[in-house]
Amino acid sequence: MESNVKQHSRLYSLGRLLKKETLAEGIGTFSLVFAGTGAVMVNNITDGTITHLGVSFVFGAVVAAMIYSLGHISGAHFNPAVTLAFWTSGFFSRRLVIPYILAQIIGAVLASTLLFISLGKVANLGATLPLNENWLQSFVLELVLTFILMFVIFGSGLDRRAPVGFAGLAIGLTVAVEAAFMGPITGASMNPARSFGPALVAGIWQHHWLYWIAPIMGAQLAVIIYRYLSCGFRDLK
């Protein structure tokens, strides 16, 4: 009887914690898509007032802000590729993978829906598309971009040897830099949820698959390389 009470208590606590964590992931991904793709749309509406570099800065800044705001609650993934990489590297529970990814997708879809209601179907709602339909080029570049991003996440956010307190800045700058120099070619998504929200609401699915497979593969490659560099992740723990 006592063991049953303890089990129910643990399940209740887990349920409350899970709600908080998934809500944080939903809010963080919503903010990322709302600010980032919103900047793309406003830049189009205002004939380039924000500029491409400005849009890149918005993406990086909102990622950094959400990491500092929500990292202590959910770990600040905001990205299915990151969630899967944390799981395969042993830093994340398998039972939380699907709830996290669903929360990220829902947050992205809600952000795109609100932008569509507010601004209309402008600039394809910031949907990511390969330049000149060159899907292979974008596939390779998205894989490399996500590898770099996940590598920075491991090095600045998880490795105990890294300077404390700079993870949000390092990750945000990485997103901004990658969006700045590769955004015109691939959209610099590096995030399946970020691409899914605009694609669903705008109904633009051309080559959408690559914005899932390439980021996931890139993040998994970072897991393999950083596992080697950190002696099987022992240096991170």
Image (cartoon, grey):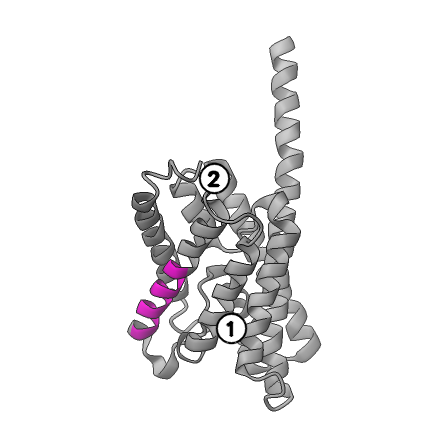
Q: Which residues are magenta?
A: 137-148
Amino acid marked by disc 2? Phe
Of residue 134 and residue 120, the one placed in the foreground of this image is 134
Q: Is residue 182 above or below residue 98?
A: below
Residue on which disc 1 sits: 203
Residue 147 drawn at (x, y percent): 37, 59
Q: What secondary structure is found at the residue carrying circle 1? A: loop
Q: Is residue 143 magenta?
A: yes
Please tell me how crowded label 1 is: few (under 14), some (14-19), or many (20+) other residues with Cα within 10 Å: few
Residue at image location 54% in from the left, 50% down from the top: 102
Q: Main secondary structure of the magenta part?
A: helix
Amino acid marked by disc 1? Gly
Q: Nearer the viewer, mark 1 or mark 2?
A: 2
Q: Quadrant of residue 30?
A: bottom right
Residue reaching furthest bottom?
47
Residue at image location 39% in from the left, 60% down from the top: 148
Residue reaching furthest top?
1
Specify the quadrant that holds the C terminus. top left
Q: Which mark is residue 191?
A: none
Residue 220 drawn at (x, y percent): 35, 51
Q: Which mark is residue 92?
A: 2
Residue 179 drawn at (x, y percent): 47, 72
Q: Is residue 208 magenta?
A: no
